Amino acid sequence: MSINQSIKPVSVEEKENLTIGGCDLVDLAKRYGTPLYVIDEATLRGICRDYKNAFKNYTNIKMMYASKALCTSAIVRILDEEGFGFDTVSAGEIYTVFKSGVDMAKVLFNGSNKSEKEIELALECNVGRFSVDNFYEAELLNKISEEKGKKADILLRITPGIECHTHDYIQTGQIDSKFGFDLSQVDDIVGLIINKYKNLNLRGLHAHIGSQIFETQSYYDEVEILVKEIARIKAKFGLNLDEINIGGGLGVKYTDADNPPSVDVLADAVTRALDKFAVEAKTIYIEPGRSIISTSGVTLYTVGSSKQVPNGRKYVAVDGGMADNPRPSMYQAKYTAQVANKIKFDETEKVTIAGRYCESGDILIEEIELPKLEAGDILCVYNTGAYNYSMASNYNRVEKPAMVLVNNSLSDIIVYRETLDNLISHDNIPDRLLR
Ligand code: LLP
């Protein structure tokens, strides 16, 4: 069993109250306020080790954390210490990684519409690899590299035509996708790189087949497609590409209904394919995001109002919702929760956890059996480490929550709670409106 197969962080304990990392969650809520993102360092380091162990016999595999899942300076530091590189997709992520002191050779810059400014920053920071997504970007990257007197090491992002069973919005490897070169376009772009783009150095191919993936056969198929494509390019153009990037996507367990494969099972599918197709590639990149950070994160909320619909369901509202976790309203994502201050209660009821935002769709959890809730209770929602803070907004002009890191009974702020002044700090009132 690996950590992505568990709903809760490894250090969770049911004492008088629920604790994580030796910290009482009710105390954390009092001390830092709610909503509060809590990250368990032991879980995060544990899954990093699960990944390293699973691939330990393959020294040419490089693990790149997909920082879009959660990118803050402290998280970057931990991943860096654990030996991960970084898959970044914006100037913001590159800057965060750079400022955290990471060796930028371990950084890959991904994305389907990188701006000139972002490309310039990436070149100035000397990021190790660019994953080139389309013809426009190849031209732009070559031009900017030439202006800067640099040569960019690139992978080509291709669309391998693999459909995984996941939510439509997070499928990416199928043919009709906004990402990457269709296989029929590969020869054209390789030809351009050889004949025209002298400031691009083609090192290999990249694909990403989707997210929250439960079937590892898709990875096997993906490696086969990438390897065969590399062989075809070698035969046609005489180019030796020695890197492949298989993307991220391994699923996690949000509820008991989810049964994601372990990291070992993923590694088995990938390495079986590498062995079978005799990959000579010097470097195989894998870029997991969700499976690295999701399980280590929980969100604490304070319970407020409730409403019993006559002959209908009971809504219980918490002080956060779709702005700190947009996943239920965007993807119908399901979550598991527990009441941090009501471990030993046995009187339960079925409730729907509603968010505080002015939108009917702002429901965090539909129909969950919990101890009878009262205002002031602290609700702990599990598995919110990935794509919660990173997709958070200020909808309804609400401040984004703080984030704390817990370990060995210590808690430290890693992201400060936004203040009301933060919210207006980017506003400007034109002179003509000033009284
Ligand atoms: N590599 C590439 C090129 C990607 O596009 C992604 C995710 C990853 C790696 C990491 O995938 P992961 O291991 O996290 O599944 N917001 C959605 C997920 C979007 C994923 C986008 N790309 C969600 O909340 O489910």
Image (cartoon, rainbow, N blue to C red):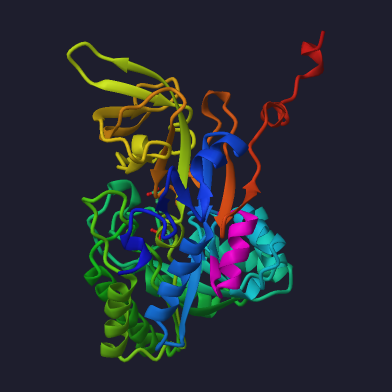
Q: Looking at the picture, does residue 362 appear above or below residue 71?
A: above
Quadrant of residue 140 within the rendered picture: bottom right
Residue 292 coordinates in the image, percent (x, y): 44, 62
Q: Is residue 83 magenta?
A: yes
Q: Residue at coordinates 27% horizontally, 74% vertically from top-left?
A: 265
What residue is rendered at 75% in x and 19% in y? Answer: 429
- Is 376 positioned to the left or the right of 312 in the image? right
Say left or right for 21 vs 399: left
Along the line of sight, which residue is nearer the eye, 301 or 341?
341
Q: Is 100 above or below relative to 126?
A: above
Identity of the residue drawn at 77% across and 12% down = 433
Q: Which residues are magenta?
A: 71-86
Query: Quick one: which residue is furthest to the left in this view?
Result: 311
Q: With 222 as the anchor, is 342 left or right in this view?
A: right
Q: Classify the position of the N terminus by image quarter.
A: bottom left
Judge by depth and name the residue closer to the eye, 84 or 145.
Answer: 84
| Quarter of the image where the C terminus is located | top right
Asked whether the viewer can see residue 375, the reply is yes
Q: Closer to the camera, 111 or 303?
A: 303
Query: Among all residues in the image, which is located at the extreme top?
Result: 435
Position of residue 120 measured from the top left corner of the image (x, y, whole percent): 69, 60
The quadrant holding residue 370 is top left
Residue toward you, 404 or 156:
404
Q: Is residue 138 above or below residue 200?
A: above
Residue 236 is covered by the magenta coloring: no
Give percent across and percent down for residue 386: 45, 52
Is residue 285 visible in the rendered image? The answer is no
Q: Please state the horizontal and vertical placement of residue 341, each as a whole percent of the image.
A: 43, 37
Q: Residue at x 23, y 51 (%)?
A: 256
